[in-house]
Amino acid sequence: MCGIVGYIGPRNATEVVVNGLQRLEYRGYDSAGIAIHGEPEGLQLRRSVGKLINLVEHLSEAPARGNIGIGHTRWATHGGVTEENAHPHRSSCGEIVVIQNGIVENYRELKGRLIELGHTFDSQTDTEVIAHLVGHYYSQTGQLEAAVRQALGELRGGNAVVAFSVSEPDRIVAARLGNAGSVTIGLGDGEIFVASDMPAILDYTRTMIFLEDREVAVVSRDAVRMSTLTGEYVKREPVAVQWDPVSAAKGDYKHFMQKEINEQPRALMDILRGRIDQDAGKVYLEDLKLDDAALRRVERIYAVACGTAWHAGLLAKFIIESLACVRVEVDYGSEFRYRQPVLGDDALLLAITQSGETADTLAAMEEARNQGAPSVALVNAIGSQAARVADGGTIYLHAGPEIGVASTKAFTSMIVGAYLFGLRLAQARETLTPQQIREHIQALIELPGKVEQVIQQTESQCADLAEHYYHATNALYLGRQFNYPIALEGALKLKEISYIHAEGYPAGEMKHGPVALIDENLPVVCIAPRDPIYEKMLSNVEQVKARHGQVIAIGTVGDDDLAAKADHTIFVPETLPLLTPALTVIPLQFFAYYVALLRGADVDQPRNLAKSVTVE
Ligand code: F6R
């Protein structure tokens, strides 16, 4: 979620960096900081807790000047919201400054090693580990680029890292590991800019180069030299960005939906950031207003939502009941308010909504308030109505703006948000031990990487599959247990953007009706990861095949049995059964996207739909 800006050139770097940070403040506002180097002032570090305005005020009292600088807006992940934890961070020698967007998954191990080597740490952040590690290698090589390269070679996780050294004030080194943090380099006339997002530098240039995974750029005033992390030279032509807010925000993607599917690893890292403590086996939900005692009093949860968010509600039921042993009922917002629900003061309403403006979901929250039951909003849009009226507090998804009408990244973030809430309840109610919570946290930490793997490995497979099936007039989606909601979600994605009629069903219900639909023309998507209900799902696949349906199976990597039975198989990695939906849904998002594309449909703005449904 953090925002990153860097500048080298003739202007006052402070102005450029702060201006850029202003465009990125939505990415994080726990703290902001800049490091500027100039002569004769040397290195000037300014950091402030809270919104960017606090840094601006700090700078008016203690100005910074120079021609090279980096800046950061922080969304706290490791370590609380304090000035010491604000970026930039410095190496032990104080010469190197570093900012980061991402998570260093193995920071504890690296920190331990560095402490043994005599390094002392001023903050609790994972980023300070990078600064010390770069400093460590710098003391051996005397060269920033080489030191960054060596240090990054040891990091696990997804990161965008930007650094400079006061001993080499003619260059900034920027690097990207994984897809969690993008790095854009803007080329000017005798000046170069670095940013996590284009809008930060669009005031100055529209000529951009985008760093790919595991690439390093050495940026001076008039040149960018790029190479892979292992040192191979990379040549990439700059792109002329035709600026309009929409096309620039879409980056290299054809549609927002495609972009947002690809953003899921980053979105999932952002929702986890600052909320999990692996050592303590604890989850923190900073905006939840219910304390342990209040969470222990909850006897029933009503998960209320619409559309895709309702599918997330179905998953929330599995997750919360299994982790925290609290009964969960799932309702459509549009049904809840008219069925005269009996809530009572031991009930809690969990409103799940991307936009936070869906009228039916808001009406359910109002009903809860009238009946004296608190509401908690699992919501993406910061400051939206749902966030404002949730008297029990808010769990922000932090998925970033979702612009494609078909919800994708908000959905997977909702799954993880529900998981965090389930763990938080379990912690308060002691239905899981800290050690068990630690195991769940570990699976959550590994999830963005697995989602990334699914994206990399399945997008082109799904595009090929779409070629086979885009003429279909009907489709059936089957899943069981945790993947039954994914069957519903896969079907919804297909129908809403490609206008193909699609039904999602619990696979066990197939024999009670939908089986009549099956013939050789019907694509049947069977979601069959290796989970506790796998064998049953395999029998359903056989039943479909016996009736000559075309089976597209989603299974766990290495499942040859499934592959032998299905017409097409797409594999996802293994994870905890309750988290498989966050992986199995991705190929279904891609499949719907490519089918819609081939049918010439308006993917981002399907007919008759709107992103925020603010009417009943
Ligand atoms: C489908 C979709 C809709 C929304 C629904 C609720 O892809 O996006 O079904 O999920 O309109 O919207 P929010 O989450 O904003 O309340």
Image (tube, rainbow, N blue to C red):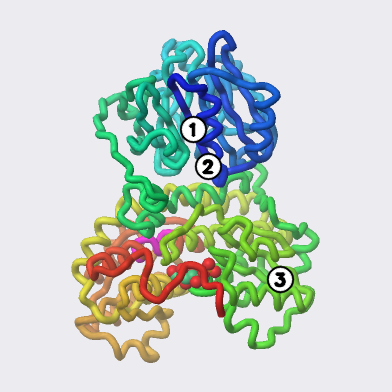
Q: For the residues marked 3 and 2, what is the alpha-carbon distance in whole angstroms?
A: 35 Å
Which circle marks residue 458 in the picture? none
Toward which corner of the image does residue 373 lie, by quadrant? bottom right
Crowding at dot 1, Cα within 10 Å, few <14 / some 14-19 / many 20+, comes out as many
Q: Which residues are drawn in magenta?
A: 583-588
- Viewer-closest of 20 and 47: 20
Tell me which residue sits at (64%, 65%) in the image.
386
Q: Is residue 458 visible?
A: yes
What amino acid is at disc 3? Leu
Tell me which residue sits at (72%, 75%) in the image.
368
Tell me which residue sits at (49%, 74%) in the image.
307
Q: Give the labeled residue for mark 1.
A: 5
Q: Position of residue 65 (x, y in %)?
A: 57, 19
- Note whether ligand 1 is within 8 Å of mark 3: no
Indicate whether 73 appears above or below 140. below
Q: Give the labeled residue for mark 2.
A: 24
Q: Give the labeled residue for mark 3.
A: 348
Local SS, label 1: strand
Whether 67 is among the magenta residues is no
